[in-house]
Image (cartoon, helix red, strand yellow):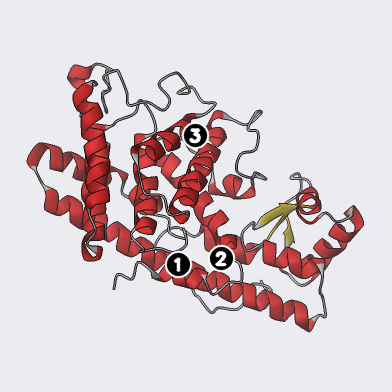
Amino acid sequence: MFAPDAPGELGEDLPNPDMLRRPTMRREAQSTSALEGTFEPLETVLAQDYEVGEDKSGLSEFMREVLNYLDAAECGIGQIQSGHPISLPLVRELQKLLVKGTKSDNPQAWDIRSTQVFIGSPTRRIEDARFAPMPPGRDLDIAVQLLVDWWRSRKEPGLAVLDMAMFHYQFETMHPFTDGNGRIGRLLVLLQMMSRGLLSQPLLSVSPWFERRRPEYQDRLLGVSTKGDWDDWILFFCQDIEESCEDALLRVKRLVNVRQRYRSLLDEHRYSGLSVQTAMYLIGQPTVTASMLRRRFGKSPSAVQHALSRLVSVGILRAYPAGRGNLYIAPDIHKVLAAPLGAAIDVSVPLMCERGE
């Protein structure tokens, strides 16, 4: 059954539910970007030593776009958690953050587009496009504002997912910006769930489900425009929300279990201090380096190396294959985060080191 608030409730089982926010949002950032043709492997995104707002110079164009999504997501989540509604200024700010420092960062970066765009043209001619959104101008400006106003007017909790499905179609069909419409539209799904009280923590990733069904996702949206096929689109959207919530439930439960097993394992070996701090940090950052931990905890190189050695000795960490430098990975956590959508996630299975793997 669909239980949309469960991921937030499960996150509250942790002393710091934000520790799961980081990997969840990175998984969403990687997947939502891949849907738009910006592909970075999930392992690379999870391993990236990056905090929101940091300098992205020197990164690839693809990685910059993925990390820009994290900046936009944190901005939106912060606004919703502070009690602010979803508004057109917020949506424009999200788009500005999304394209910052990319080829789409231009004077129109946060404005409703003033040029015509079209989608799916093999010849790059509008006549051959699969879909052409409404032209720019006053009508588009008014339509986007009316859509946001409509969302804010909707109050019935039992219709929230239906409202989200209708909003998402309209937003993607209007295509209000020159770039980033798909990523913003999917980010708004998360923000809308939080604003309606369906999620207390942003621990849901909706894009992997859409990514696995990309052609159908596009066809269902187009079906509403060409045939008025609302039923199939709404059912498709609701299936994403339901299955994504079930997937999030399993991942959060497994991560909570892994965290508890880490504590038991370290207690058994009488390890404490930085070893425990690092093990808990791994829940949100499953790939680490010694320098990353020194910055995080403000400890000396010898103290950090001692903690790493202890975690390797009990199997919580493994040194990455040769040639990757001073890199360590927590295999149990990484396995949970990197598992494809729909994979069988055994919530209570022992740690790999406990099974002798």
| Three-letter code, disc 2 | Pro
**Quadrant of the image for the N terminus?**
bottom left
User: How many marks on residues?
Assistant: 3
Determine the CA span between mark 3 and mark 2. Answer: 25 Å
- Residue at 22% across / 30% down in the picture? 142
- Residue at 31% across / 59% down in the picture? 241
Determine the CA span between mark 1 and mark 2. Answer: 9 Å
Residue 355 visible? The answer is no
Residue 70 picture location, percent across and down = 52, 44
Residue 138 picture location, percent across and down = 21, 22
Q: Earlier in the sequence, mark 1 or mark 2?
A: 1
Identify the residue position indicated by label 1 in the image.
8
**Closest to the observer, 76 or 186:** 76
The reply to whether discs 3 and 2 touch (Cβ–Cβ < 8 Å) is: no
| Three-letter code, disc 3 | Leu
Q: Residue 91: which quarter of the image?
A: top left
Label placed on residue 131: none
Q: Quick one: SS at disc 1?
A: helix
Q: Residue furthest left?
A: 227
Q: Is residue 57 left or right of residue 71?
A: right
Q: Residues within 10 Å of mark 1 (few under 14, many from 20)?
A: many
Residue 169 visible? The answer is yes
- Residue at 41% across / 65% down in the picture? 247
Q: Earlier in the sequence, mark 1 or mark 3?
A: 1
Q: Residue 181: which quarter of the image?
A: top left
Q: Is residue 30 above or below residue 316?
A: above
Q: Residues within 10 Å of mark 2 (few under 14, many from 20)?
A: some
Q: Quick one: SS at disc 3?
A: helix
Q: Quick one: SS at disc 2?
A: loop
The reply to whether discs 1 and 2 touch (Cβ–Cβ < 8 Å) is: yes
| Three-letter code, disc 1 | Gly
Q: Is residue 279 above or below residue 169?
A: below
